[in-house]
Image (cartoon, grey):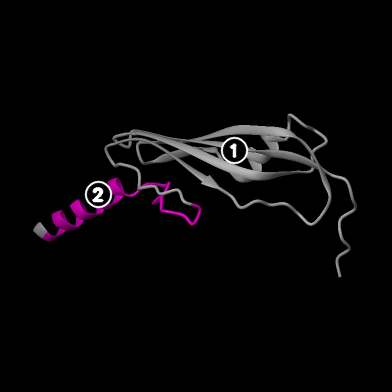
């Protein structure tokens, strides 16, 4: 009986201390982060994606940004969409004829209270461009 209690307690503790978001680590672009707190989190962080200046010619249209939100409830349900493709599509709404975004930066803010409500806000910032030449032929 004692073994079952210990095993159950370990399982419950593991379930409470692990989240859907996973660990946040130091990346190669100079931003250091720590994992979100189990009891309370109020963190901000960022990620700078490498310059993506393609070999193609392009015209700069202007700065763009968009925001996404994912939310978890009671360690049981997670909803929302902060994927890069969704954020990119929303950012390009400002310049509908844009082909791509370069110089992308991603900022995040994590708000967590006892795992009851865990919110991850993600902001994408970048530069919208329109390609002025034809793409290179694939071989």
Q: Nearer the viewer, residue 74 or 45?
A: 45
Residue that appears at 48% across and 38% down:
108
Specify few, some or many for label 1: CA neighbours under 10 Å numbering under 14, 14-19, or 20 or more.
many
- In primary-sequence order, the first of circles 2 and 1 is 2
Q: Residue furthest bottom?
A: 139
Q: Single out the mark in the foreground, 2 or 1.
A: 1
- Measured as percent of width and height from the top left, residue 2 is found at 9, 57
- In the picture, the disc for residue 124 is 1
Drawn side of residue 95 relative to residue 51, left or right: right
| Secondary structure at numbered mark 1 | strand
- In the picture, the disc for residue 73 is none
Q: Is residue 1 visible?
A: no
Drawn side of residue 11 relative to residue 58, left or right: left
Q: Residue 95 sits in which quadrant?
A: top right
Residue that appears at 45% across and 48% down:
31
Which image quadrant: the C terminus? bottom right
Q: Is residue 25 magenta?
A: yes
Q: Nearer the viewer, residue 22 or 128?
A: 128
Drawn side of residue 109 relative to residue 8, left or right: right
Residue that appears at 49% across and 57% down:
28
Q: Nearer the viewer, residue 53 or 135?
A: 53
Drawn side of residue 88 relative to residue 69, left or right: right
Q: Nearer the viewer, residue 50 or 120?
A: 50
- Measured as percent of width and height from the top left, residue 75 is found at 36, 41
Q: Is residue 13 magenta?
A: yes
Q: Which residue is mark 2?
A: 12
| Magenta span of residues | 3-29
Q: Residue 82 sits in which quadrant?
A: top right
| Mark 2 → mark 1, Cα distance in angstroms | 36 Å
């Amino acid at each position: 009986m004692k073994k079952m209690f210990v095993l159950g307690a370990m399982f419950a503790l593991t379930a409470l201390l692990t989240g859907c978001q996973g660990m946040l680590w130091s990346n190669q672009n100079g931003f250091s982060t720590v994992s979100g707190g189990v009891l309370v989190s109020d963190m901000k962080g960022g990620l700078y994606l490498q310059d993506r200046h393609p070999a193609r010619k392009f015209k700069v249209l202007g700065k763009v940004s968009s925001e996404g939100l994912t939310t978890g409830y009671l360690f049981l349900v997670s909803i929302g969409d902060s994927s890069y493709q969704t954020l990119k599509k929303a950012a390009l709404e400002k310049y509908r004829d844009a082909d791509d975004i370069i110089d992308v930066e991603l900022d995040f803010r994590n708000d967590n209270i006892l795992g009851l409500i865990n919110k991850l806000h993600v902001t994408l910032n970048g530069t919208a461009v329109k390609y002025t030449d034809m793409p290179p032929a694939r071989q």
